[in-house]
Image (cartoon, helix red, strand yellow):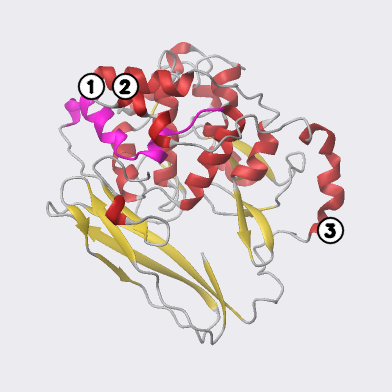
Amino acid sequence: MYYISVGGNWYPPELTAYDEQDGPLRVDYFGEYDVNVVGVYKITYVAKDLDGNVTYYYIYLHVLESIGDQPPADYPEMDEAALVELKARFQNERNKVLPKYTDPFDATVYYASLNGLTGQAFLNELRRIISTNITPTAYDDVRFILEKSDAVDSPWGTYLYGIYSGTKLVRYWDGGSTWNREHVWPNSKLGVKNQVDQAADPHNLRAISVSVNSYRSNRFFTNGDGSSSYHIVGTDGFYPGDDHRGDVARILFYMYVRYYDILTLVDTVEEILSGENYKPSGAKFGLLSVLLKWHYLDPVSKFERHRNNVIYSYQGNRNPFIDHPEYVSIIFNYELNIFNETFNVIIVIPKTEIDPSKLRKREYFS
């Protein structure tokens, strides 16, 4: 997000795109904005490869009366002086939840053992990488990890970014009064009730508005009715919104690989609804072919990379599909040939974050 005072100078940032097969691609943008009119403007970037596959990337411009003005009505209280009492309520517990993995992360070392592997061998090794030498997280501790992993800075302070709705949530845990911990892969579909690992894994947990958490319930993910915002589809389906669908897909891909002996991604509603909640027969979720498309329609964001880094510092493992989006095609092309769908990877990257000249095949975020 970008913030300027009304009448200020601003130009859409230049982006670049890289395709695994076609190399650097042209990126165009569209969307009207007026720096002289207060409001929020959405700019859409589009990249298309030679086969016609399209990827979108979105940024938002906030034009304000003055950067020093009071925050908009949809912002929570973020003044540190006003939040002292709220922060103090759980400070003793918060002090016990500390990062354990503080050395600089080196992706080339972390994923090095995957070099030269394909098919089932690649999948097995990726499972090993994200499942060993880690410190599983307690569910209560996730409250304080989310305070950092889901945080977004703004001119008025820090807030938590609520999944699905994009609601700006108060930055400290408030006992569940205004925000909860959302199981993206629903708790009832994790196989065994109160199982520590998969139920408490912060990679699967997001800060969420209490009302949105209740609204989503444990519905499976599917395409929506054309609206860009989150909504229920039919009785048991749920669309997470255009800006959240890629995040959802990558979280579920992580859960499938990490807890491969418990969880299964499927592609039919009947399979999802046939099992019993909190039982191994109910540890199925999807819809997989929809998630695969969402992964490419909503690319990895700066917010996701921040989350990945924070969670790694506490738990010691990463969501590999954030670090390496192309792993999705490597794994699921192997496992899901029945869908007869092929996706090319197009990653749209802000030039200020990555030098495209240094990109090599399957090394988008080195």
Left or right position of 87 against 51? right
Picture layout, residue 189 above or below residue 41: above
Query: What's the CA distance linking mark 2 and mark 1?
Result: 7 Å
- Of residue 106 and residue 332, the one placed in the foreground of this image is 106
Decide if residue 43 is on the left or right side of residue 4. left
Q: Is residue 276 above or below residue 243?
A: above
Tag of residue 57: none
- Under mark 3, the amino acid is Ala
Q: Residue 119 got which mark?
A: 1
CB atoms at circles 2 and 1 under 8 Å apart? Answer: yes
Please state the total of marks drawn on the protein image: 3
Please indicate, yes or no, whether residue 236 appears anywhere in the rendered image: no
Q: Which mark is residue 123?
A: 2
SS under mark 3: helix
- The answer to whether any part of residue 257 appears in the image is yes
What predominant SS class does the magenta segment belong to? helix
Kindly identify the amino acid type of the residue bearing the numbered disc 1: Gly
Q: Which residues are the magenta region?
A: 316-339
Tag 2: Cα neighbours inside 10 Å, few (<14), some, or many (≥20)?
many
Residue type marked 2: Leu
Quadrant occupied by the C terminus: top left
Mark 3, residues whose alpha carbon is within 10 Å: few (<14), some, or many (≥20)?
A: few
Q: Which residue is mark 3?
A: 82
